[in-house]
């Protein structure tokens, strides 16, 4: 193989290696960008979720303040007439449920008794002891106790506040609450992403779960997964992804899972843990962010970059070969012809002086000068040997 | 003695007859034969091995059968 061919092969191999390198680097950068996008989606969802909780705590606190300011309700509570209190407050509870999504309203007896006096959403159940953390927080702080609490089947956001009599003495507590299912509709509307909330089974009752699903006309999904059960999902396609390895493994700020492609749609997925008001990790919210357009753009960018690289590579290889041709190969070829001709003539007995001019001031020129001198020496030696 | 010199003369005659470049052709044959044709004289000692290599080289370069 000629040196020229070897140079071309080496240049082509280098260009191919550069192409592989660029492909690898673009793929790595693309994956890093997708990770950032997925991470941002999870972070944004967590922030939005937390903000929704804060906003709704404020909303419920405001509603609670209005309820507690109603003297007529207070008077009925103080008489201990549960039916009269229910009759007076239940229209208001219905309005609150309709307008503000308030699903729970309680009148609660103070410590140390700490029992339910009246549930406006379930009049027939009362006198049961209150063990909820939000109630205990309100008892301890004599102020608002607020947060998410996991019941037997679902999360409820609750706000509890001490209930004072006309003379300012503590007569009980009042509590309002709502289920947080609507969080996911708002999250979906705001971000365009899909969400699912899973709850740890060991924090729930399988029996209550089955009853709740049946009464909601939904199939019982308790056995669908090993350690968690899907409580809410904005899409059936979301899947648990890497969450199957455990909610405990999730980073507090959220973790990103492997992206998933199905039906031409690629989704970046991740999850953040959900804590109850006591700070116990009880589940997680899975986020699925559509990155199809981004992955398509990355593929196109990668292809364009490679095409550009190939075009630049071809131009560079051609330019390199042309330059080498002028600077090296043509001169080497001329030098070889000159050396062969002079050598053959000398070997054939031509002892006439042949001028061996250097074609440049470089390695080739230096060799031509050197060979010219050497040829002179040979010529002189042969002349002596042949006696001419 | 003189056999190798005669062979060289025979080669020179062929080159001359065919109008070939004298020095270049002899140079080519010298390179292939492994010795300089120009330093062969009638006094040069005969060497069957050199004669054989001259024949091979001449036949190869000139492309015709040599009779020496």
Image (cartoon, coloured by chain):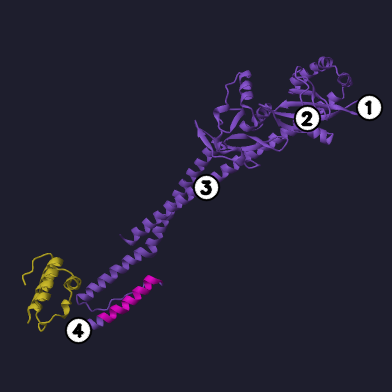
Chain colours: A purple, B yellow
Locate residue A144, reporting x and y percent: 81, 33
Please tell me which of labels 2 and 4 falls first in the chain: 2
* Any part of residue B14 in sight: yes
> Label 2, label 3: how many angstroms apart (C-alpha)?
48 Å
The disc placed on residue A28 is 3
> Label 1, label 3: how many angstroms apart (C-alpha)?
70 Å
Q: Is mark 4 in CB contact (under 8 Å) with mark 1?
A: no
Quickly name the residue at label 4: A385
**Which chain is mark 4 on?**
A
Which of A121/A14 is in front?
A: A121
Quickly name the residue at label 2: A159
Classify 10 Å Cα crowding around label 4: few (below 14), some (14-19), many (20 and above): few
Q: Is residue A373 magenta?
A: yes
Report the label total: 4
Please tell me which of labels 2 and 3 falls first in the chain: 3
Q: Is residue A371 magenta?
A: yes
- Which image quadrant is residue A243 in? top right
The disc placed on residue A167 is 1
The mark closer to the camera, 2 or 4, is 2
**Which chain is mark 3 on?**
A
The mark closer to the camera, 4 or 1, is 1
Q: Secondary structure at mark 3?
A: helix
Q: Which residues are magenta?
A: A362-378
**Which chain is mark 2 on?**
A
Labels 2 and 1 positioned on one and the same chain? yes
Q: Secondary structure at mark 4?
A: helix
The quarter in which the C terminus of chain A is drawn is bottom left
Which of A219/B68 is in front?
A: A219
Compared with A242, A6 (above or below) is: below
**Which chain is mark 1 on?**
A
Name the side, left or right, on which B34 lies relative to A106: left
Q: Secondary structure at mark 1?
A: loop
């Amino acid at each position: 193989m000629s040196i020229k061919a070897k140079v071309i092969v080496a240049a082509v191999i280098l260009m191919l290696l550069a192409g592989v390198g660029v492909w690898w680097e673009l793929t790595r950068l693309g994956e890093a960008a997708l990770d950032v996008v997925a991470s941002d989606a999870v972070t944004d969802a967590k922030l939005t979720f937390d903000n929704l909780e804060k906003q709704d705590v404020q909303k419920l606190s405001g509603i609670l303040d209005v309820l507690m300011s109603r003297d007529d309700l207070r008077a009925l509570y103080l008489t201990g007439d549960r039916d009269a209190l229910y009759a007076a407050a239940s229209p208001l509870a219905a309005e609150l449920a309709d307008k503000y999504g308030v699903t729970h309203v309680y009148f609660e007896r103070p410590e140390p008794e700490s029992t339910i006096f009246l549930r406006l959403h379930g009049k027939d159940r009362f006198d049961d002891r209150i063990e909820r953390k939000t109630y205990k927080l309100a008892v301890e702080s004599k102020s608002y106790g607020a947060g998410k609490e996991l019941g037997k089947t679902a999360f409820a956001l609750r706000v509890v506040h001490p209930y004072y009599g006309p003379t300012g003495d503590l007569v009980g507590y009042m509590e309002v609450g709502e289920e947080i299912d609507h969080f996911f509709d708002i999250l979906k509307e705001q971000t365009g992403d899909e969400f699912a909330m899973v709850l740890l089974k060991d924090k729930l009752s399988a029996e209550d779960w089955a009853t709740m699903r049946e009464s909601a006309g939904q199939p019982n999904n308790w056995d669908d997964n090993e350690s968690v059960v899907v409580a809410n999902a904005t899409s059936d396609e979301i899947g648990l992804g890497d969450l199957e390895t455990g909610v405990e493994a999730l980073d507090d700020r959220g973790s990103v899972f492997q992206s998933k492609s199905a039906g031409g749609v690629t989704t970046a997925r991740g999850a953040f843990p959900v804590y109850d008001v006591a700070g116990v990790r009880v589940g997680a919210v899975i986020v699925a962010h559509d990155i199809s357009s981004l992955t398509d753009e990355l593929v196109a960018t990668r292809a364009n970059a490679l095409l550009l690289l190939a075009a630049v590579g071809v131009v560079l290889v051609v330019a390199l070969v042309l330059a080498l041709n002028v600077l090296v190969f043509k001169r080497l070829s001329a030098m070889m012809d000159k050396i062969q001709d002079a050598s053959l003539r000398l070997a054939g007995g031509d002892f006439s002086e042949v001028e061996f001019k250097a074609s440049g001031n470089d390695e080739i020129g230096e060799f031509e000068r050197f060979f010219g001198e050497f040829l002179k020496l040979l010529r002189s030696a042969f002349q002596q040997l042949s006696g001419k | 003695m003189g056999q190798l010199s005669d062979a060289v003369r025979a080669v020179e005659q062929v080159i001359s007859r065919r109008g070939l470049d004298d020095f270049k052709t002899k140079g080519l044959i010298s390179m292939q034969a492994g010795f300089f044709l120009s330093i062969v004289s009638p006094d040069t000692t005969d060497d069957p091995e050199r004669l054989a290599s001259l024949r091979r080289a001449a036949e190869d370069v000139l492309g015709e059968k040599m009779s020496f």
